[in-house]
């Protein structure tokens, strides 16, 4: 087995991904690309990570404010999801998620494939909205 150097998938500002995953053949749509619903599910998971950290409690997705598929994703792409809190309300957190695919392991190239904005609401242990604590 050969040790290959790791190619970091970082944004220019040095941010690290909230989530990184490689889609498998079971994630394909009939056209042979990764199913959009799979990408949407991963975006939701990635966005919930900083939302939960900021809310300091469980969060639930209440809105997909925008979602744009820029390029298809293929089996074997290493897909990285970058998520940032962009606003905090009394009970809600809005997160921007950018998705990049690293392709061709022999000659790696990274392309932006998706971007989305989602809103999460902080919930208590009974599933009721709760206020988000001040930082």
Image: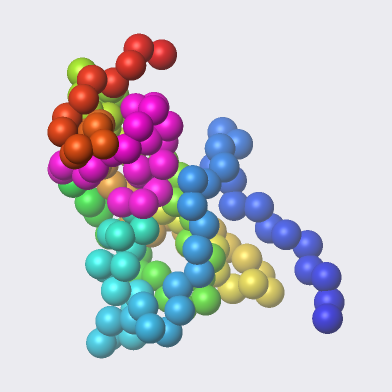
The answer to whether 134 appears left or right of 121 in the picture is right
- In this rendering, is residue 115 above or below 30? above
Location of residue 41 in the rendering, given as x and y in whole percent from the top left corner:
30, 60
Residue 102 vertical position relative to residue 61 in the rendered view, above or below = below
Q: What kind of colouring is applied to the model shown?
A: rainbow
On screen, residue 111 versus residue 113, left or right, reads right
Picture coordinates of residue 99, whole percent (x, y): 41, 53
Is 35 situated above or below 16? below
Q: Residue at horizontal 25%, vertical 67%?
A: 37
Q: Is residue 29 visible?
A: yes
Q: Residue 48 occupies which quadrant of the picture? A: top left
The reply to whether the magenta stretch includes residue 9 is no
Quadrant occupied by the C terminus: top left
Work out which quarter of the rendered image holds the N terminus and state it: bottom right
Q: Which residues are magenta?
A: 44-63
Query: Which SS does the magenta portion mostly show?
Result: helix
Q: Residue at x 50, y 63 (%)?
A: 21
- The answer to whether residue 51 of the structure is visible from this angle is no
Front residue of 54/7: it is 54
Image point (63%, 66%), residue name = 108
Question: Is residue 19 positioned above or below 75 on the image?
Answer: above
């Amino acid at each position: 087995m050969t040790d290959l150097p790791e190619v970091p998938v970082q944004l220019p500002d040095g941010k690290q991904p909230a989530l990184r995953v490689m889609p498998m053949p079971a994630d394909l749509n009939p056209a042979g690309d990764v199913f959009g619903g799979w990408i949407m599910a991963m975006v939701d998971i990635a966005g919930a990570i900083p939302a939960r950290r900021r809310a300091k409690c469980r969060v639930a997705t209440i809105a997909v404010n925008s979602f744009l598929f820029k390029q298809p994703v293929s089996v074997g792409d290493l897909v990285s999801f970058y998520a940032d809190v962009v606003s905090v309300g009394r009970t809600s957190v809005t997160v921007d998620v950018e998705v990049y695919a690293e392709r061709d392991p022999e000659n790696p190239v990274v392309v932006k494939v998706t971007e989305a904005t989602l809103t999460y609401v902080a919930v208590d242990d009974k599933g009721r909205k709760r206020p988000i604590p001040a930082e």
